[in-house]
Image (cartoon, rainbow, N blue to C red):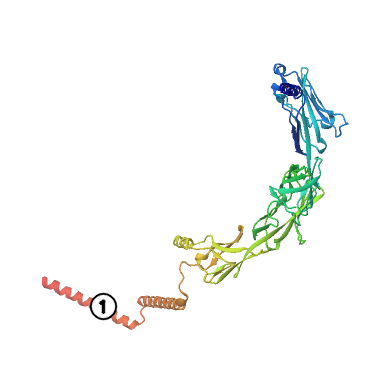
Amino acid sequence: MRPVSLVLFLTFALLAFNADCILPGVAEEQKVWARAGSSAVLPCHLSPRKMGKSWKQQPDKTSVLWKRHGGSTHQEPHMVLEVGYSGLRKTALPMRARVSVQDSALRHGNFSLRIDPVRSEDAGLYEAQVTYNMEVQSCQVELGVITVTLSPPSPVVENEPLLLSCNSSHRASLVETRWFHNGRPVPTSRTFCSSHGALSILHTAMSDAGSWRCQLRYSDNKIISATYNLQILGFDGPTNPVVYAAAGSAADLPCTLSYLPSALGINVVTVHWSRPSGGHLQDGGISQNSSSRSFHLRLPVVGPDDAGQYRCAVSVGSKTISRDVTLAVVTVTPSIQGPVSEGSRLQLICSLTHPRGHERFQWKHLDSAPTNSKLAVATSHNLEGQRPQMGPTLEIPHVSQKDMGTWECSVHGPEGRLGAVEYGLQITGAQVSSPPTIFSGQATFGLTLTLFLLLTVCVLALALKKRARSPAFPALAGMVAVTVAKKKEMEENSKEKIQQTEC
């Protein structure tokens, strides 16, 4: 038993010695997957313990050479990147400006190779040889590339068909392909059709933008996946926007792209506004601007004749996308044109062009125009308890001064307030207090009678005054004069008798 044990001991010792001699010079192969168009790092980390004390003392006396092995075993490997002792770099022409190593990382034993961006033809076996003094260490990394392509190429515009293709450099046969949109599996339907690594979208929508991930499963049970961020050039906002504007006011029709054209590499953008119905459009000219994504159309004053559909067409290269915008005009039609007499019956009808069927109307008295401070206080009290009236028609049975001012008709939908129009109510013959209708005839008769009596009194007074100045009976006036004269003579005679007696 002892010879057998000795043989086994020597065998294991020899294997361990050989392994200790071989491992420092032979690298363990690694596998890295990267998507074409993204960046990839081929790792190569050699610790100072494996490289010995000589590297610790002189880390600057180190060079690294990255080589790529050919597709077949008979093809010789070729240089990718070399960094010499002095720091001089050599790069292969096909990968120039796409490969690099970090100088600061080299001093810490990190000789990883960075490729940015990765191309599909970069797939293969790479080897790094690190030389310090007379010793050589190596790393081997296999780069696998997975490619996601678009047809037609970017930019992808809304409503166009799209084909997403996914394939990799793995040598086994493809068994299954699965697609995920924003983390959720995409089932096969009329819109999405998956077949052998490809996904077709018949009509792209803005909701299709986002993260798409393809998952490839091969016959050797190897699963490879890649993610692609899909950007779709379309319009922001709802698909069929409706703008509500009051008659006589301005309106802004929206036309905003989902992305800035210059961010997608688009330098020229042509925008044209038109009316599909054939109406005249003065501001429908063509404009070019790639530094903005908003191309609104402003109408200074709108009326019922301006209501309808407008089309914003944006041309990007050879592709054109368009969006229709509907202008709905809100108007108020009174049953009485012009100023309204107090006590009249008035109807205000709020109408909307191009309704969608879910709009609701609401009336509200915003302010009033009282004639004095007392009435102002009374009117404000009335408005405090006033509630908005619903419906397109506002009926005022007897118009009074408290109804004067601005009435607002607002249009509401499921998304909230859509628009509003204002109507100014003016009243003629307004008074502080108005008597009831039933007494109007009696008041008129009483006022007429009073005026007649006053006129009669005035006439009598004037007649009496005239009589006092010139009497109408001259004989009577003479008799009065004689009587007065005799009376004066008698008084004088009596005075003389009194004087004689005293003497």
Q: Quadrant of residue 274?
A: bottom right
Q: Quadrant of residue 189?
A: bottom right
Task: Between residue 383 and residue 111, name the one nearer to us.
Answer: 111
Q: Residue furthest front?
A: 1
Q: Residue at x 20, y 75 (%)?
A: 491
- Image coords of residue 45 (percent x, y): 72, 27
**Residue 287 can be seen in this image:** no
- In the image, residue 66 above or below residue 163: above
- In the image, residue 18 above or below residue 474: above
The residue at which mark 1 appears reads as 485
Task: Between residue 503 and residue 5, name the one nearer to us.
Answer: 5
Count of numbered badges drawn on the protein:
1
Q: Which secondary structure lies at badge 1?
A: helix
- Image coords of residue 289 (percent x, y): 75, 45
| Quadrant assignment for the N terminus | top right
| Quadrant assignment for the C terminus | bottom left
**Residue 47 can be seen in this image:** yes
Q: Residues within 10 Å of mark 1 (few under 14, many from 20)?
A: few
Task: Between residue 361 and residue 358, name the one nearer to us.
Answer: 358
Dot 1 amino acid type: Ala
- Image coords of residue 54 (percent x, y): 72, 16
Task: Between residue 251 and residue 300, name the one nearer to us.
Answer: 251
